[in-house]
Amino acid sequence: MAIVSEDPSNPCYEIKSADLSLVALVLKTSDMAKVSRAFAVQMAESPGFFDHDPLVIDVSGLSLVEHETIDLSALTTLLTQHRLVPLAIKGASEALLDLAKGLGLVEASDARIRRSIPLAEPQTPQEPMADAFITSPALSVAMRIDKSLRSGQQVYAKGRDLIVMGMVNAGAEVIADGHIHVYGTLRGKAIAGARGNTDALIFAQAMEPELISIAGVYRTSENLLSKDLFGKPALVSLNSGPDGDKLLINPLKN
C-alpha cells in the first residue's frame, strides 16, 4: 500500500506499509501486583535489558468472563517504568478493548506470537563449524570478553554478537542480540537473539548450561542434556515449524 499527498508534482509525504519488530507480554494472570513483583525480580537480574522496545500485550490466555477486565492503566505504567513501550493489545474482550483504546493501545488481534515447545536434540551432523562464527548481518562488530565470567557477573552485547574467550561459570549470564560464542565451558545462562533475532546461534566448546535461550524460546538445566552432548562442543539453533518453535542442539565435530 502507498498513498502520496494530493499534489503529485510536489509531494510532502507518503504513507506506506511498514513492518515493526515487537516484543510480546503474554499474560498468565490478571493479578497486576503479582506481575509487578515478577518484573522487579526479573529486572534486578537483568538491569537495562529493555531499551524502549515496542510491545503488544497478549491477554489471549486469560480466562476472563465477558465483562471482566484487568488494570491496564497499572500495567502500562509498570511497562513504561521498565523501559517498554506498550502499543497494542491482543485477545481482548470488547470491554477490555474499550479500556485499551482509552489508553492509546490499538487492537492487534492478528499479531503472531511465537510459541514455545520442548527442545529436541537431533543427532544429525552439523554443517560446517564455521557457520557458528559468522557475524550477524546488520549487527555491529562483536563484543569480545577475554576472560572467564564468575558467578553473579552479567554481560550484554547490545546490537551485536558476543564472544567469550574463557568459561561462563554457573551463576554467570551472557546475553546478546546476535550470536553467542563461548570458547570454554558454558555452565551459566546464555541468551542469544535477545531482541527477537531467530537466526541467532549459541556455540560452546563444552555445553553444560543452566539455561539457554534464543529469541525467547528457552531450556533449563532441569531438562538434562544427553551424554552425547553434555560437556561436548555443541551448537544451539532455533527451528520454527507448524507445531511451534524448538531449540535444536547439534554436536560439533572436529
Image (spheres, rainbow, N blue to C red):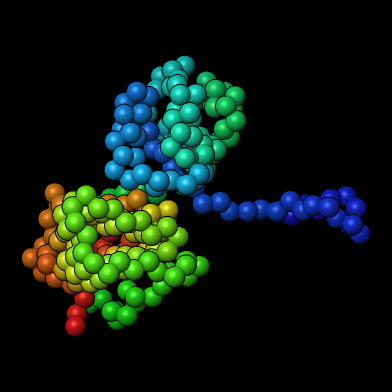
84 vs 217: above or below: above
> Residue 147 appears in which quarter of the rendering?
bottom left
Query: With 172 as the anchor, is 115 left or right in this view?
Result: right
Point 77% across, 53% down: residue: 14
Query: Looking at the image, can residue 17 be seen?
Result: yes
Quadrant including the C terminus: bottom left
Instruction: Choose between 51 and 146: the one closer to the eye.
Output: 146
Point 33% across, 45% down: residue: 46
Give the number of callouts: 0
> Residue 78 appears in which quarter of the rendering?
top left
Residue 62 percent across, percent down from the top left: 37, 28
Which residue lies most toward the left here?
227
Residue 98 percent across, percent down from the top left: 57, 23
Query: With 52 as the anchor, is 149 left or right in this view?
Result: left
Quadrant including the N terminus: bottom right
Residue 231 percent across, percent down from the top left: 12, 67
Point 31% across, 39% down: residue: 44
Point 74% across, 51% down: residue: 15
Instruction: Choose between 147 and 69: the one closer to the eye.
Output: 147
230 vs 63: above or below: below
Query: Looking at the image, can residue 91 be seen?
Result: no
Query: With 6 as the anchor, is 134 left or right in this view?
Result: left
Residue 59 percent across, percent down from the top left: 42, 32
Which residue lies most toward the front here?
147
Instruction: Choose between 94 and 251: the one closer to the eye.
Output: 251
